[in-house]
Structure formats: structure tokens, C-alpha cells
Amino acid sequence: MKISTSTIAIVLAIPMAVAASVASAQDDSAQLLEMLDADGNGSLSESEASANEMIMSKWDALDADGNSEISAEELAALAAE
Ligand SMILES: [Ca+2]
Ligand SMILES: [Ca+2]
């Protein structure tokens, strides 16, 4: 069986594309956190997050541990959707 180089390229490209989309989702949430984190403590209070409608609309779901702060890890769940 002859495998063309274009077949190989497609097979190699799929996992790379998946990895790239995961990486960019993490970058997005990190960027969003940096943008909104006014006091720079690495997590978002409700007043910091109030600038972002998407976060506010999902606040209860995002604040997994219920401490009224969205951590970087909790925010990553938003990007991972
Ligand atoms: Ca903060
Ligand atoms: Ca939390």
C-alpha cells in the first residue's frame, strides 16, 4: 500500500490542531484573567468580573468551590467549553 505524503500530513495535522485549540483556550482565559484582575491577586472577585457579562452569567457555575472568587483554574473551565 502506498501512502502519499499528503495523507501523512493530514494524519499529523489533526492532533496538532487539537493541541493548538486547547492551548489557545488556555491562553484566552489567562489573558481574560489578566485583563479583569484589577488588584492582580490572580483571581477575580465579583466586582472585577462584573466587567464581563459572560463570566457574570455563568458565575455560579464557574465558582466551583464557592469562595466568591474565580481562580485561573475556574476561569479555564469557561474557555474549555
Ligand atoms: Ca482580583
Ligand atoms: Ca472559586
Image (cartoon, grey):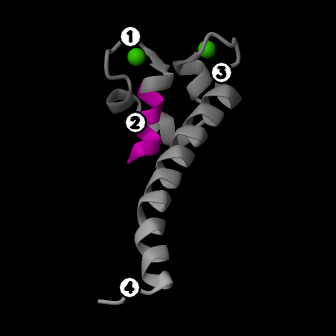
Of the two numbered discs 3 and 2 in the rendering, the one whose residue sits closer to the viewer: 2
Residue 2: x percent and y percent? 35, 89
- Magenta-highlighted residues: 74-81
User: Are discs 4 and 3 less than 8 Å apart at CB?
Assistant: no
Looking at the rendered image, the disc whose residue lies closer to the viewer, 2 or 4, is 4
The reply to whether the C-beta atoms of the residues labelled 1 and 2 are less than 8 Å apart is no
Q: Earlier in the sequence, mark 3 or mark 2?
A: 3
Give the prevailing secondary structure in the magenta stretch: helix
The Cα–Cα distance between marks 3 and 2, rounded to whole angstroms, is 17 Å
Q: Which residue lies furthest to the left in this view?
A: 1
Is the residue at mark 3 in contact range of ligand 1, meaning its CB lies under 8 Å from it?
Answer: yes
* Spot occupied by residue 74 in the image (x, y as percentages of width and height): 42, 26
| SS for dot 1 | loop
Mark 3 crowdedness (10 Å alpha carbons): few <14, some 14-19, many ≥20: some
Residue ID for mark 3: 37
Residue 7 in the image, given as x and y percentages of width and height: 42, 82
Identify the residue at the far front of this view.
1
Label 1: which residue? 67
Q: Which of marks 3 and 1 is nearer the N terminus?
A: 3
How far apart marks 2 and 4 lie (CA) works out to: 39 Å
Query: How many neighbours does mark 2 have within 10 angstroms: few (below 14), some (14-19), or many (20 or more)?
Result: some
Sequence-wise first label, 1 or 4: 4
Q: What residue type is labelled 2?
A: Ala
Residue 62, how many percent across, how many down?
38, 30
Secondary structure of the residue carrying tag 2 is helix
Q: Which mark is residue 3?
A: 4
Decide which of tag 2 and tag 4 comes sooner along the chain. 4
Tell which of 34 and 16 is nearer to you: 16
Q: Residues within 10 Å of mark 4 (few under 14, many from 20)?
A: few
Q: Which residue lies under the disc numbered 2?
A: 77
